[in-house]
Image (cartoon, rainbow, N blue to C red):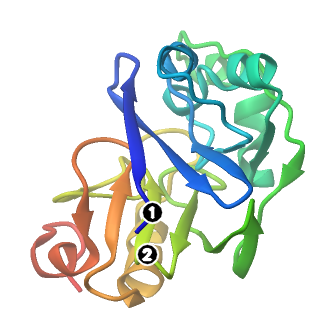
Amino acid sequence: MIDFQSFIGGIFETNAYLVSAPNGAILFDAPAGTCEWLKATRQRPDLLLITHGHVDHIEDAHIVKERFGCKVGYHIDSAPLITDPGFFKQFGFALEVEPTKADFLIDETDSRDFLGLQFRIFLVPGHCPGSLCFYLPEEKALVGGDVLFAGSIGRTDLPGCDHQALISNIRNKLYLLPDETKVLPGHGPSTTIGEEKRHNPFVRG
């Protein structure tokens, strides 16, 4: 069984996850404080996969990339948020992020190898353009970003959001996964697909 280590960073208490793969370590998202956590625990990511481009998930992305020399991947629709330091200011948010260039882009696919682990990748926009969920079938584990939470869903009042698209994507993509699938969200505790299908007040299965 693969162990997903978690770190909570930044003022929004954002989750990052680190998993050991056969050919290295994969880090999912990089909230503020991630680099210091990695150094303190003497861990070194070989790959950084970004679920989406909201600032609380990428604050340490450029630091992690420079410190550890890891490759970075994300969806092309998230690129403007991650590479333009003033992206959020045009919408009235006093936020700025250090740009992080992608070494490769990621799209929806039934199977993609990352350091020896085979992931199914879902493109699940609605909360943010280019939102990705990474599903590991052998483990029945889903790194979900800010798409689906325990008893909630990602907010849809930010630039680029689409509430109906988010609901539809959750129901028609994520809810087709096995009920026992463990969901590792971008905020808050883990949950399962079955639990959310039965009790999530925003999207019932």
Say whether residue 160 is left or right of residue 174. Answer: right
Percent from the top left, x then y, of residue 121? 63, 72
Q: Which residue is mark 1?
A: 2
Q: Residue at 49% of width from left, 27% of height from top? A: 56
Quarter of the image that includes the N terminus: bottom left
Direction left: furthest residue: 199
Asked if residue 125 lies left or right of residue 177, the reply is: right
Asked whether the beta carbons under mark 2 and mark 1 sit within 8 Å of each other, the answer is yes
Q: Nearer the viewer, residue 89 or 147?
A: 147
Q: Is residue 91 visible?
A: yes
The answer to which image quadrant residue 10 occupies is top left
Instruction: Say few, some or many: other residues with alpha carbon within 10 Å of mark 1 (under 14 / 14 to 19 / 20 or more).
Output: few
Q: Which three-letter amino acid code belongs to the residue tagged 1?
A: Ile
Residue at image location 42% in from the left, 78% down from the top: 174
Residue 203, percent from left and from top = 24, 73
Judging by the rendered image, the residue that carries numbered circle 2 is: 139
Q: Is residue 156 visible?
A: no
Marks 2 and 1, how far apart at CA: 7 Å
Residue 181 % position (x, y): 33, 77
Residue 192 as seen in the image, left or right of residue 151: right
Q: Which of 123/127 is in front?
A: 123
